[in-house]
Image (spheres, rainbow, N blue to C red):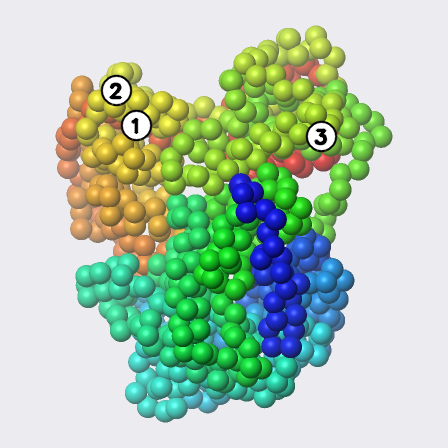
Amino acid sequence: MTSKNYPYSTLFSPIQVNRLTLKNRIVMGPMGNISMAEEMGRPSNKMIQYFADRARGGAGLLTSGLVPISQAVDPTVTERGNKSYFPRIDSSRTVFSGWRDLAESVHAYGCRFFIQLTAGLGRVGSPESLLTKFRMPVSASWNPNFYIPGIPCRPLTDGECRTIIKAAGQGAADAKAATIDGVYLHGHEGYLLEQMTNPAFNRRKLGRFANWQNFGLDMVKVVRKRVGLNFPIMYRIDLSLALNETYGNRMDTVASLRKFKKERTVAETLEYMVNLVKAGVDLFDVDLGCYDNWWLPHPPNSMPSGCFLPVSRLVKEWFAREKVLSNAGLPVPIVAVGKLGYPDLAEQALRNGECDMIMLARPLLADAEWPNKAYAGNVMDICPCIGDQEGCINEFVEGGHLQCSVNPRTGFEDVYVRELAPTSSPKKVAIIGAGPAGILCAITAAHRRHRVALFEKTDRVGGMLVPGSVAKIKYEVKNYLVYLEHQLKACQEKYDLTVELNSEVTPESLKGKGFDTVVVSVGGSAVTPRLPGVEQQNVIQAIDLFRKPELAAKARNVVVVGAGAVGCEAAQFLSAELGKKVTVVEMLPTIMPGLCTANRGHLIHELENLGVLLWNCTKLLSIEGNNVKLARNVSATVPDPYVTWTPLLPENISNPFAKPIKEEIEEQTIPAELVVLAMGLRSGRAFYEACVTTQAAPEVIQLGDTFQIGRVFEAVKSGSLVGRNL
C-alpha cells in the first residue's frame, strides 16, 4: 500500500463506453448478491444500501452479482416454491421497483450501474434440484455435475437455448427501463453461457448450437436489438479455462475432467471476442479458469497481485493490432481483473497500457471508500483485502450472504451507520489482548469517545496476525496488520486511547483501576496432544515456527501434524521458503475442511507441485527421537487428498455417491528431525472467568477467541460490534 504513483491521474480520468461516459476507470466487480434480495428476487434495502455505499465511495461503475434469466429452463437457479436466492429481473413487475431504487441510489453519487445477466448455472448449479424439483441439472452436453460428478447434467434442447436467449433480451430491456445503465453478460468461469460457448463443455453434433459461438452471438444480437444501439453491453470472458495447463496428464485419467480436454484455445477466444464485438459488445473483462480450477477466477491470498495483467495486455494489444472497433466506432476497452487493490499497481497498469480499466471486487468490500481514499492520496487509510474469501464467497456457500472478513459493515450497510455517534455516557474501558478483535473493539470504542486502555502482553499488537503474516503467501495479512497498526496510532493521537505493550495484567490489578467495563480478548492457546515424545525439543507449535523460523534450521525432514489451513500454510512455508522435505499427517479424510474452495484448491495444488506429502486418515502415535510413528489407513478407499477439481460439500449436504472408507491400518515410522504441531487452538476462557469471579469491573465481556475459536472474520465482526454497543 504505497503511493509512489500519486496523484493517480490515469485511474481517475474519464472513459467513454458506447455513448456513456464513466467518471473514472474503477469498476466494481461482480460479487454474488446471494440472499440479499427478497425471496422472489426484488432487491432489498440491504442490497440497495450495499451498492449505494460503493457508489458513495467513488467508483465509476458498479456491477451486480449474478442475475439469472433462465428460471424457465435451469432448475438450479431457484429453490422449492420458485423462491430465489439470487436477485431477479425476470419474474414480474413486482421486482422492478427494487432495481429502480438501486439505480437511483447509485446515480445520486455520479456512479453508473450495470446488471450482470447470466444464462444460468448449468453443471455448476446445485444438484439438489433432483430432490426438490425432480428435475435434472442442465448443460450444453452430457456433463458431470461439479459438486457431485456422479450426477449427470442433461443437454439443453435448441428450443430451451432459444428460450434463454429471448429471456436475456427481455431482461436487458427491463433493465434499461429500470434506468440501469448497461448489461453485463456472464460468459466466463464455466457457468451456463460459457458451457454453451466452449468446446470443452459443448460437444453437440447437431443443430444451430453445435457451433459453440452461436449461443453467445445470438444472445448479444437479441440484447442489442432490444436495447438499441446506444446502450452499453459488457461481456465477461476467460481467455482460457487453463484446465490442461493446470492438470496435465490428469485430463486423461480423471473421469470428471476427461471430457473437458478440448477446451477453447486462446486463438479461438480472441476470434470469438471479435465476433462478439461485431454482434454488439462494447466492453470486456477477461481472466482465466473455471470452477474446476476455482482459484484462478477467484485468486486467493496465496496468489500474486496483478496476476491477470498479462491476460488483459494480450487482449488489448491484439485488439489494437487488429483495429477492432465497437459498433459505436470506439476502441473496445479491456478491463483488467485479479488482485488489483493497490493504487500504485492499478495506476501503473493503466499507464503501461496493460488495460483500460481496473476491476476491484473484494477490495471494495474491504473498503467501500477505496476510490475516494486513493484519489485523496490517503493510501495508508485503505483497509486492504486479505484474500481469505471467508466472508465474500464462503459465507454464501455455507448459506449466508455477502460479507467481508475485514469490514464488519459489508452486507450490513442497512443496519450499521457509517459514522459512529459519540456516546452520551463515556465509560472507562479496559481491553485485554490486542489481536484483531481487541484492536477493532478499542478503535471503535475510542471513536465513540469512551476512555480506552488496550493491554497487550507481547511487544507488538496483532495477536495471531503476527505469526500468520510471516509466510510470503500471507503478504496480504501483513498488509492488514500494518493497516491496523496505522489506524491504532492515528486513533491514539485523536482520541482517549492508550496502548500498553509488554503488559500482563491480572483480574486483581484491573479491579483496582476503576474500569467500568473489562473486555477480555486474550485469544486462544495452541493444542498439544498427550502422546509419547511430545515433550521433546524437536517438537514445536506452528505459531512458534512462524515466530522463529530458525527453529527449523537443522531439520531436513519435517512432519506437520494437522492439515487445517495453518498446518498446510506451515508446510508450504517449510518447503517453498526453507527448502525442507515435508509430510503432513491428518486424522480426517479431508484436507482443510471448511476453507474457501479457491483458497483450499490453490494451496493443495501448490503443495503437490512442491512435492509435499499429504497423508490423510493418518494418526500420530508417538515421537521417538528423530522419527515419528504413525497409524496410516492405506486402503484404496481413502480419498485422494490432492483432488481439487471437485469441492468438499458443506457439512449439511450428504453425497449419496460417497463411498464408505474401509480401514486397512499400517503402522509406519518415518524420519522427522522436526515435528510441527498444527492441531488448532483452545479458547482462553480462564482469564475471563477469573475476571467474573473477582468482579474486575461492573461489566465483563468475552470477545473473539476467548469465547470461541474463529477466524479474522469472526474476530473483526465481534470486536466492532462490542465497540459499537459499549
Between disc 3 and disc 1, whose residue precedes?
A: 3
Horizontal and vertical percent position of residue 479: 50, 37
At 28% from the left edge and 59% from the top edge, which residue is drawn? Answer: 246
Q: Are marks 3 and 1 in contact (CB under 8 Å)?
A: no
- Mark 2 highlights which residue? 538
Rounded to the nearest whole Å, what is the CA distance between mark 3 and mark 2? 43 Å
Q: Are marks 3 and 2 in contact (CB under 8 Å)?
A: no
- Mark 3 highlights which residue? 445
Kind of residue at disc 3: Ala
Rounded to the nearest whole Å, what is the CA distance between mark 3 and mark 1? 38 Å
Kind of residue at disc 2: Asn
Mark 1 surroundings within 10 Å by alpha-carbon count, few (fewer than 14), some (14 through 19), many (20 or more): many
Q: Secondary structure at mark 3?
A: helix
At 66% from the left edge and 63% from the top edge, which residue is drawn? Answer: 23
Between disc 2 and disc 1, whose residue precedes?
A: 2
User: Left or right: where does residue 585 sit relative to residue 696?
Assistant: left
At 23% from the left edge and 30% from the top edge, which residue is drawn? Answer: 558
At 30% from the left edge and 87% from the top edge, which residue is drawn? Answer: 205
Taking depth in this image into account, of 18 and 488 the one nearest to the observer is: 18
Mark 2 surroundings within 10 Å by alpha-carbon count, few (fewer than 14), some (14 through 19), many (20 or more): some
Quadrant of the image occupied by residue 471: top left
User: Left or right: where does residue 261 sit relative to residue 668?
Assistant: right
Q: Secondary structure at mark 1?
A: strand
Quadrant of the image occupied by residue 211: bottom left
User: Left or right: where does residue 185 sit relative to residue 570?
Assistant: right
Residue at the far right: name it.
424
Horizontal and vertical percent position of residue 413: 69, 50
- Mark 1 highlights which residue? 676
Quick check: 622 above or below 222?
A: above
Q: Quadrant of the C terminus?
A: top right
